[in-house]
Image: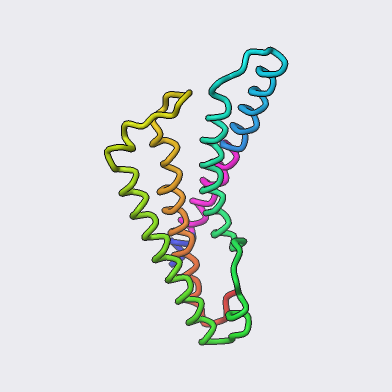
C-alpha cells in the first residue's frame, strides 16, 4: 500500500505550494491595501476581500497539512497508556471514525457547493463566483481523506506499534 503513501506525499507537496501561493497573496494584497489607503489615499476596495479569500484557502489547506504531519490537537491519554494489539485496534477505530467524519463532510460540502444558490453568488468587490472561494472546502477534505487513509493503512499493515 505504498501507493497511497506516495499519493499522500504528492498531495502534501501540492498543499505546500497552495499555502505558499495564498500566503504570498495575503501579504501582497494587505500591503498594497495599506499603501494605497494611507500613502496614496486611494484605497483598493478589493484588497480585503482577496485577502479573506486567500485566508479561507490557507486555513482549510493548512488543516489538511496538519493532519498529514500529525500536529493536530488530540487527546492521546488512552492510546499512550495502551500497548501492542489493543493500541493498534484503538488507533484503527480512531482513524476509521476520522475517515467517516471527513468522508461525511466531503459529501456535505459537495452537495452544498453544487446547490443552485451557490452557483449564482458572487464576491462583492472582485465579482468572482463565490464557488472559487468555497472550493477550498471539498478540496481540503479530499486531501484530508487521502492523508488519514494513508495513516490508517500504515497502522493496519504494521505489526509494530506506530506512533
| Front position in the image: 120 or 160 | 120
- At x 45%, y 26%, the residue is 124
Q: Nearer the viewer, residue 52 or 93?
A: 52
Q: Residue at x 50, y 80 (%)?
A: 90
Q: For this rendering, which residue is in front, 163 or 118?
A: 118
Q: Nearer the viewer, residue 44 or 151?
A: 44
Q: Position of residue 8 (x, y in %)?
A: 48, 57
Q: From the image, which quarter does the C terminus lie in?
A: bottom right
- Residue 47: where, in percent of width, then height? 57, 25
Q: To which quarter of the image does residue 52 belong?
A: top right
Rendered residue at 48%/58% (across/down)? 6
Please give the range of residues in magenta: 6-21
Magenta-colored stretch includes residue 16: yes
Residue in view at x 51 percent, y 76 percent: 91
Quadrant, the N terminus: bottom left
Colour scheme of the picture: rainbow
The quarter of the displayed image where residue 82 is located: bottom right
Q: Is residue 146 above or below residue 137?
A: below
Q: Is residue 141 left or right of residue 110?
A: right
x and y percentages locating residue 148 in the rendered image: 47, 63
Q: Which secondary structure type mostly characterizes the magenta part of the structure?
A: helix
User: Residue pushed farthest right?
Assistant: 39
Vertical placement of residue 97 versus 132, above or below: below
Q: Is residue 91 magenta?
A: no
Whether residue 114 is situated above or below residue 50 in the rendered picture: below
Q: Residue 120 appears at what percent x and percent y? A: 32, 31
Amino acid at each position: 500500500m505504498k501507493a497511497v503513501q506516495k499519493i499522500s506525499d504528492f498531495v502534501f507537496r501540492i498543499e505546500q505550494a497552495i499555502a505558499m501561493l495564498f500566503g504570498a497573496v495575503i501579504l501582497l494584497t494587505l500591503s498594497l491595501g495599506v499603501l494605497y489607503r494611507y500613502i496614496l489615499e486611494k484605497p483598493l476596495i478589493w484588497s480585503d476581500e482577496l485577502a479573506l479569500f486567500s485566508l479561507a484557502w490557507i486555513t482549510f489547506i493548512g488543516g489538511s497539512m496538519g493532519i498529514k504531519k500529525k500536529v493536530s490537537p488530540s487527546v492521546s491519554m488512552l492510546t499512550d497508556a495502551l500497548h501492542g494489539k489493543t493500541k493498534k485496534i484503538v488507533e484503527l477505530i480512531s482513524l476509521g471514525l476520522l475517515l467517516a467524519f471527513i468522508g461525511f463532510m466531503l459529501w456535505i460540502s459537495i452537495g452544498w457547493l453544487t446547490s443552485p444558490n451557490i452557483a449564482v453568488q458572487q464576491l462583492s468587490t472582485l465579482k468572482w463566483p463565490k464557488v472559487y472561494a468555497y472550493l477550498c472546502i471539498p478540496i481540503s477534505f479530499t486531501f484530508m481523506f487521502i492523508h488519514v487513509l494513508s495513516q490508517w493503512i500504515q497502522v493496519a499493515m504494521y505489526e509494530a506499534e506506530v506512533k
